Image: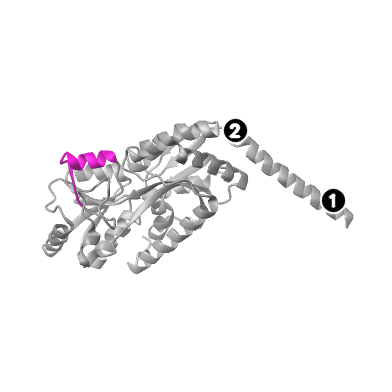
Amino acid sequence: MHSFLRWLAAGLATACMATAAWSQAFPAKPVTLMVPYPAGGVSDVIARTLNTTLAKHLGQPVIVENLGGASGGIAAQKVLNSPADGYMIFQGSPNELILAPMANAAIKYKPEDFRLVQMITLNPLVMFARKDFPADTPAQFLAYAKQAAADKKPVTYASVGPGSMYHLLGEHLSKITGIEMTHVPYKGGAPALQDMMSGQVDIFLSVYNKSMVQMVEEGKLKAPAALSSERQESFKQAQPLNDLPALKGFVFDTWAGFFVHKDTPEAVVQTLHKALSEVANDAAIRSALEAQAMIVPRPQPLTAMAKVYADNTARYRAIAKAINLQPQ
């Protein structure tokens, strides 16, 4: 019995020493920040705004890697296929980790395979449209979309891939209005935006940055509607869909955060949480992201992050069920 207790005590001591060693040793080499879309989109802007500051807090370089495709699923799977050691951080949102697995049969991971370490931005959503789209308000959009569907030329809407948040919201809008629209998936926001600017697709329900606001102001794009409950401070020209009785409650936004494999050692998660929290509190980072028309929330403890992630998972699973979203 005494020998067993000595063995158990030795085992616990070894585990504690290993945890302490993880904490002290991490990171001992460069860290990869995985962005699940091509360079040039909103996600990429966030990553390249803060990677240098994050590197200072971690004491190692932070390398941004862009890998688009499958609504972010290819990049997310690469993170899961890598060792659960904290050296590969996934910069993502409900779009890639909650929605993509529900819509893409090729994606085998679950939201619960990841752990949210810290949020970095809250992102309002706006309906963008090609510059010659014949609608400037939510009411005009509904009228035009209804007539286009009747003429067998449905409005086309872009997304960053099947099962993405923008796909889900497009389908949800189509369902509650009873107006047929055609989904056009892309590998990221940047190529979707490029095609909309060239008139290849009609609308794009999306987050935005300052450059997209400027494109609207310069007449390169339109913004006929917002998905917020009221007009947004940084995008006052976009009237909310929520103003229309038929679309009351059609209110959505999204957020970006940093995730790791769920099996990442707790000491490593704590180290990353501390560094990412310092980044989120950094005045220069906050100013740079706010200048891009993003909202930067104050950092929250890991327990709060777990609740946010669980609540979002439940909400979007309910919407997917309501529109009968099926894996393809």
What residue is disc 2 on? 28
Which percent across, then down, holds residue 154? 17, 59
Q: Is residue 289 above or below residue 92?
A: above
User: What residue occupies the far right of the structure in this picture?
Assistant: 2
- Which residue corresponds to the image point at 50% horizontal and 58% vertical from the top-left? 307
Is residue 221 inside the magenta stretch? yes
| Circle 1 Cα neighbour tier, 10 Å, few/some/many (<14 / 14–19 / ≥20) | few
x then y, percent, for residue 70: 37, 50
> Is 267 situated left or right of 141 in this image?
right
Indicate left or right for 65 with 149 as reference: right
Task: Tell me the residue at 37%/50% (across/down).
Answer: 71
Asked whether residue 120 is in view, the answer is yes
Task: Quote the CA–CA distance across marks 1 and 2.
Answer: 33 Å
- Judging by the rendered image, the residue that carries numbered circle 1 is 6
Image quadrant where residue 176 sits: bottom left
Q: Residue 104: percent from the left, percent from the top?
A: 39, 57
- Three-letter amino acid code at disc 1? Arg
Q: Which residues are magenta?
A: 210-224
Q: Is residue 95 left or right of residue 181?
A: right
Sequence-wise first label, 1 or 2: 1
Q: Residues within 10 Å of mark 2 (few under 14, many from 20)?
A: few
